[in-house]
Image (cartoon, helix red, strand yellow):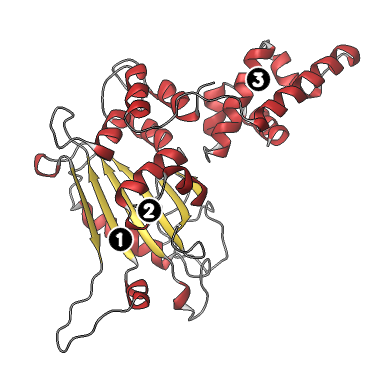
Amino acid sequence: MQTYEADVIDLTNNGDILPDLDSCCKKIMSSKLIIAKLLQAVVPEYLDSEADDIVDMISNVSVSETPVDSDILPVIQGESTEDMSVMEGKRIYDIKFTARTPQNRQIALIINLEIQNNFNAGYPLIKRAEYYCARLISGQLNTVFTGSHYEKIEKVYSIWICTSPDEKHKNTISHYKMNRYDLAGKYIDTQQDILDYDLMNVIMVCLGDSDTKECRGIIRMLHSLLVARIPAAEKKRIVHEEYGIPMNKEIDKEVDDMCNISSLYINRGRAEGRAEGIEIGVEKGIGIGEFREKVKMIVEMFRNSIPVTTIANIAHLSVEETEKIIHENT
């Protein structure tokens, strides 16, 4: 069985040309394991953590759903609630999620991941990234804290993957953060002091040319996944052999149980004339084996927080059919 990461490489790689670069990048970067590899490489809190452990710390992932701007009346809202800014219009984060820190599982980070294909957009990109951090902070009012409980504000990261940077930024990773400088006297920060002011962080990951020695580590992995015009098989080989991202796996227990239940429905359907659990596959003329593969893919994508509408398009099903499969198998 191919993993989600292998499936999405196949789905987003069309020979030498990606059909929709922005959409494909978001699909690839919505994998929790790939996100974990990125966090492990660039976010200090995860430098000493294993990628599989980081996956378990990630939650509330939303892809192209959460608005950047929100100046409507305060309401309690979930991660994926959409609203519109009256003054500034509507902007949507590419990917937004929360992640617990390995040092203290009670502390959460709010992380925004942006895939930027236009590096020279007519304004300094770092200023836009800083603005996103500011919105990630102010957006916590009435979601993370209320009233004057500023002590509850959570640290934020806005991570930008720039696929086509200018020459001087190629193959670089830069971290912008808030620091304290003494203008008079001398004071040594406690750990709590640092936690209190180190709240806004921008990380710029600028990809580059694969034939240079600087293109290595996480830069090479992201370049292979997002930029390189190479066959899907070669992409899968690189991310598997060099970065330990599995491309195949055995059917996990939950999917195996689901397949057994589907078989039960098939036998029951023969007796009753219709099997509720596989009626979608029967109606569309899909073989049992192919149906199981499709269900497995749908469940895997749903667990990786891919929007249902996107899953339906990939699976060539209606949104209603896709939701039914998800409901019956999760």
Distance of mark 2 from mark 1, alpha carbons?
A: 14 Å
Residue 42 percent across, percent down from the top left: 30, 50
Q: Earlier in the sequence, mark 3 or mark 2?
A: 2
Which quadrant would residue 178 be assigned to in this image?
Answer: bottom left
Residue 187 percent across, percent down from the top left: 23, 85
Q: Which of 115 and 199 is in front in this view?
A: 199
User: Which mark, by number, is residue 292?
Assistant: 3
Q: Which of marks 1 and 3 is nearer the N terminus?
A: 1
Distance of mark 3 from mark 2, alpha carbons?
A: 36 Å
Residue 310 percent across, percent down from the top left: 52, 32
Between label 3 and label 2, give the one nearer the viewer: 2
User: Which mark, by number, is residue 201?
Assistant: 1
* Residue under label 2: 46
Between label 2 and label 1, give the one nearer the viewer: 2
Q: Is residue 108 above or below residue 61?
A: below
Q: In the orientation shown, which residue stands out farthest toward the bottom?
A: 185
In percent of the image, x 75 and y 23: which residue is there?
A: 260
In percent of the image, x 36 and y 19: which residue is there?
A: 232
Secondary structure of residue under mark 3: helix
Q: Residues within 10 Å of mark 1 (few under 14, many from 20)?
A: many
Say whether marks 3 and 2 touch (CB < 8 Å). no
Q: How crowded is mark 2: few (under 14 residues within 10 Å), some or many (20 or more)?
A: many
